[in-house]
Amino acid sequence: MLIGEKALSTPMDELWSKYTAYLNQLNEVVARLIMALTRANPRNVSEVARVTGLSPSLAHYYLKRLVERRFLKITTKVNYPRIGLRPSQVLIETSPDKRKFVHEALKVNDYWHYIAPCYGHFNGFYMGAIVPFGKEIEFRLFLDTLQERGLIKRFSIDWLEDIIDISRGFYWFDFKRKKWIFRWDDWVKEVMNAHYVPVKNSINTNGTYFSFKPDFTDIFILKELEKDACVSFREIASKLDITSPAVRYHYYNHVIRFNLIKGYRPVVLPYPPSVSDLFIFCIEFYDDVSLGKFINSLNGKPFTTSVSKVANRCKVYMDVYLPKTEFFNFVDALVRLSDINIVLDFNYVILDFKKYSRQTIPYERYVDGKWVYSHKEYISKVQTIAKKVSKLYSMST
């Protein structure tokens, strides 16, 4: 059985079909609902109604219609530090002929969270990992081994201090003409004049963050919610071979009570995938004030859903999804922010999201209230792959 559960990739023609259907459904009420679902629990219609300003019956109607017709999928953002996992961002450089072996090697570590081929500042892979607290050194040694055995050329790893969720909005959308209007000049001014909102450190790096130790049932529930925020208690119960009331008890008395959920993510494509690109921008700022103003300006914009703050640095990683025609306009906006001493520096990679893979939290590695990190096993598997590569190269020479 696989560790975690992998999300299936979606063919491009199906993504286009979903986008067209979604665009036809999009109106100001639907837009308000999508924006609200970043912070409102989709299982709680009263909460959704309160955040959107809709009546409970209307909120339920729109939510049910969008989900059932598959115009909208809602996933759950797990509060990883609360369950003992520390998020990180990794960029890897490798040679084209070794890509498939590196991809295989990265996945021997059960704590990979997502992996995608990338091009740009690093030509190789972009990886997110959620590593048990106290195992940061072992994880870096895992990456060091990949480099020492010649599978990768170089890598960069940053441990995250916070993952800030951005409410993807529709302030730049013309509902009458059904098109986006990208107001980059206005955005630059908005960053300049934005209120400074301090970025709080939500991750205690010494590992004493936790006031509650979840059990295996809690972790399994989170795994299911991570795939689908609207999954029924009955479905989870059938997989665990327990009763629905037992799942309900764990959900409300453990998962919700102890804040094991950080928020929710409505999965929508603001523009067609066939004419758009997904980037990861690494941006450094002059100071905390500049960083806070920048992040505060992003809410309601269509081009990002999250900003990951690097520990002890004025530095973030930001996912940026843009139409191809708007990429250089975005870069120009960053250059202008650099000219006025807000942005210190930036670089980026473009992701091949057709080959993007993701898995849920590795729930099978949670044993007796602890995360099992099998360092020796991971290193052994990497060495086996490296020997296979060496043998192939020796045979070809």
Image: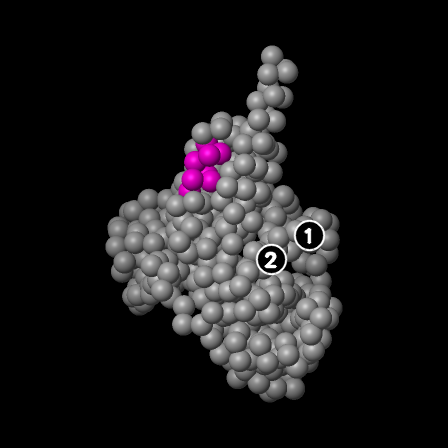
Per the rendering, the mark at residue 253 is none
**Total residue callouts:** 2
* Mark-to-mark CA distance, 1 and 2: 9 Å
Q: Secondary structure at mark 2?
A: helix
Q: Of 296 and 240, which appears nearest the observer?
A: 240
The residue labelled by disc 2 is 364
Characterize the local packing of mark 1: few (<14), some (14-19) or many (20 or more) Cα atoms within 10 angstroms: few
Q: Residue at x 55, y 29 (%)?
A: 386
Residue 380 in the magenta stretch? The answer is no
Q: Of 75 and 295, which appears nearest the observer?
A: 75
Q: Residue at x 59, y 32 (%)?
A: 385
Residue most extreme to the top = 397
Q: Are marks 1 and 2 in contact (CB under 8 Å)?
A: yes
Q: Residue at x 48, y 54 (%)?
A: 130
Residue span colored magenta: 140-147
Identified by mark 2, the residue type is: Glu
Compared to residue 213, the image places residue 59 above or below, namely below
The residue labelled by disc 1 is 1
- Across and down, in percent, residue 89 comes to 45, 48
Q: Secondary structure at mark 1?
A: loop
Q: Is residue 297 left or right of residue 181?
A: left
Q: Of 322 and 187, which appears nearest the observer?
A: 322
